[in-house]
Image (cartoon, helix red, strand yellow):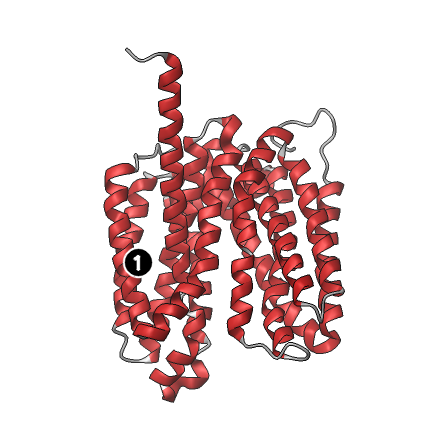
Amino acid sequence: MPTSESATAGDSRSLRGLLLLLATIAGISVANIYYNQPLLDDFRQAFPGGAAWIGAVPAATQLGYAAGMLLLAPLGDRFDRRRIILMQTALLCCALLVATTAPTLPVLIGASLAMGVLSTIAQQAVPFAAELAPPEGRGHAVGTVMSGLLIGILLARTAAGFVGQYFGWRSVFGASIVVLLCLAVVIIKKLPKSRPTSTLSYGKLLGSMWHLAVELRGLREASATGACLFAAFSLFWPVLTLLLAGEPFHLGPQVAGLFGIVGAAGALAAPWAGRSADKRGPRAVITMSIALMALAFVIFAFSGKSLIGLVIGVVVLDVGVQAAQISNQSRIYALRPEARSRVNTVFMVCYFIGGATGSAVGAATWHAFGWVGVCVAGLGFTALAAWVHFATRPRVNASAQTS
């Protein structure tokens, strides 16, 4: 008969295995919204008559992902997340098949929109991890799954570029179908069912997100802080390609893409950030994250002609933004355990609004004020995050709901 200690060790190993599976699900699913970015020139050559509309392919994917977060992610509170993940995986394979065989650019754009909506499988995996983990290990669990998601984002462009170069762009989507089907087999065998925590109708489920945002100050603060920090992060990356293309670097987009590999430091820091949030509290880690991101933009400001400086700044920036995101998510999942999918949806929608704002500000600032102006704008968004973070600091006896 096993001892309680050995049973506990077995439970711990089982949980680690499930978290690694959820991390794999998150990474493989979210990668589908980034595969098309290095393939735009291939699309232009395949559909020369629609060259002016090639940019609509990644735009449709991002728009679809935002819509999927809003419309599909909350369903995890109402239905078994395992079933949702499997259904979305099957439908995503169908969308990928359409993309693989797309005869015209409009068909590819429509398939890309559907791929974006259905790739929100990742937004089921992260709350699932928070549900499976004990309260004292929730931050570490979220960090583990987020590390998988981040690695998927970082490696998607590299993988798509390699497969596209040697086998053609249609093979990229075909290969994704094969990977997803293999993943589905593992999910059926290994992933347990989740416990629905709500009986609300779909309409009321969506409407309840507004009430959650109004009632939970902690959710509003985390969403605002996360949006500002992701705005600073998103401001940097598009402009980096423009910086590297000019003097003194004269480097192409391939080199800019390699900086994403450097950003893997952020993914590796994710579990550490989760453990720190468990031990020291999310607010302490967020404070450190804001300081790291501010430091990154100071480094960038003095590295407009230094690749080494840019590399160092990227590592610091990625560690800062990922530590903040994981700490914020660990925090919001504790607010309403029965509504984790919905609070995650509120947070992530605000997060991506911040990212879109940062991208727009970055492009405009680059053309008007150059690299130093971009760095100042990044510091501005970081300072705004700091203001939100410290201005909303809870009083000593504040309730858990509003902290």
Q: In this view, does 348 lie above or below 138?
A: below
Q: Is residue 224 above or below residue 244?
A: above
**232 sits to left or right of 141:** right
Does any portion of residue 211 appear in the rendered image? no
| Residue at 44 percent of width and 59 percent of height | 155
Q: Quadrant of residue 279?
A: top right
**217 sits to left or right of 187:** right
**287 sits to left or right of 180:** right
Quarter that holds the N terminus: top left
Number of numbered discs visible in the structure rendering: 1
**Mark 1 residue element:** helix
- Specify the farthest residue to the front: 308
**190 sits to left or right of 66:** left
For badge 1, the amino acid type reads Leu
Coordinates of residue 6 in the picture (x, y in percent): 36, 17
Query: Mark 1 sits on what residue?
Result: 92
Q: How crowded is mark 1: few (under 14 residues within 10 Å), some or many (20 or more)?
A: many
Q: Quadrant of residue 237?
A: bottom right
Does any portion of residue 228 appear in the rendered image? yes
Q: Is residue 74 above or below residue 94?
A: above
Coordinates of residue 370 in the picture (x, y in percent): 73, 74
| Residue at 53 percent of width and 46 percent of height | 268
| Residue at 44 percent of width and 75 percent of height | 56
Coordinates of residue 221 in the picture (x, y in percent): 65, 43
Viewer-side residue, 258 vs 231: 258
Coordinates of residue 15 in the picture (x, y in percent): 39, 31
Viewer-side residue, 144 vs 124: 144
